[in-house]
Image (spheres, rainbow, N blue to C red):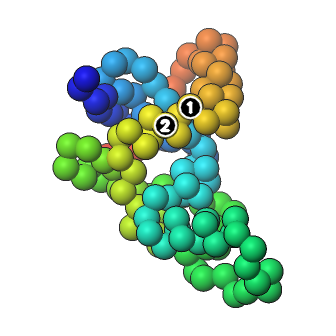
């Protein structure tokens, strides 16, 4: 089976990324959702540490603090298999494989957002998005 590849990415509002796949399907991701699920080693380790019994008074590392107003500044294609995002908090280490992004799209948060976006598009078809140029 040939994996699906993105053919277009754009911001759908201030806090959502829309990815159109070569199958014609469009998936939607809240930006903070994507950032919090960054697959890089340091973010994965931090998520694992927060799920185990550790010191509740430990000092958070800079990559563990995801503030309000997070924005996606840039998206880059990595080979033929992934995207790398540059975030407004300076983080840029995560490589989001196409398969991983498709997996994330099945999360209830993304599925609810997709239903909401679909409903909004039917009500108001004019485009209110900003395009992110993959490099």
Q: Specify the farthest residue to the front.
A: 53
Residue 129 seen: no
Tell me the number on the disc at residue 85. none
- Picture quadrant where residue 50 is located: bottom right
Q: In what element is the residue under mark 2? A: helix
Tell me the number on the disc at residue 103. 2
Q: Are marks 2 and 1 in contact (CB under 8 Å)?
A: yes
Q: In what element is the residue under mark 1? A: loop
- Name the residue that disc number 1 marks: 106
- Picture quadrant where residue 109 is located: top right
Residue situated in front as seen by the camera: 6 or 44: 44
Could you tell me residue 94's position as x and y percent?
Answer: 41, 61
Could you tell me residue 124's position as x and y percent?
Answer: 63, 17
Could you tell me residue 20's position as x and y percent?
Answer: 39, 28
Answer above or below: position of 126 versus 84. above
Q: Which residue is found at the position 73% from the left and 86% from the top?
A: 58
Q: Which residue is found at the position 43% from the left and 43% from the top?
A: 100
């Amino acid at each position: 089976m040939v994996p699906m590849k993105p053919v277009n990415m754009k911001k759908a509002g201030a806090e959502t990324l829309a990815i159109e796949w070569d199958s014609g399907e469009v998936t939607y991701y809240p930006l903070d959702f994507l950032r919090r699920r960054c697959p890089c080693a340091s973010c994965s380790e931090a998520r694992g540490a927060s799920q185990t019994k550790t010191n509740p008074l430990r000092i958070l590392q800079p990559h563990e603090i995801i503030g309000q107003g997070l924005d996606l500044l840039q998206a880059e294609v990595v080979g033929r298999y992934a995207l790398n995002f540059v975030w407004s908090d300076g983080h840029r280490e995560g490589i989001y494989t196409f398969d991983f992004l498709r997996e994330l799209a099945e999360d209830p948060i993304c599925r609810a957002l997709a239903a909401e976006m679909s409903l909004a598009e039917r009500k108001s078809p004019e485009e209110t998005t900003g395009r992110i140029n993959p490099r």
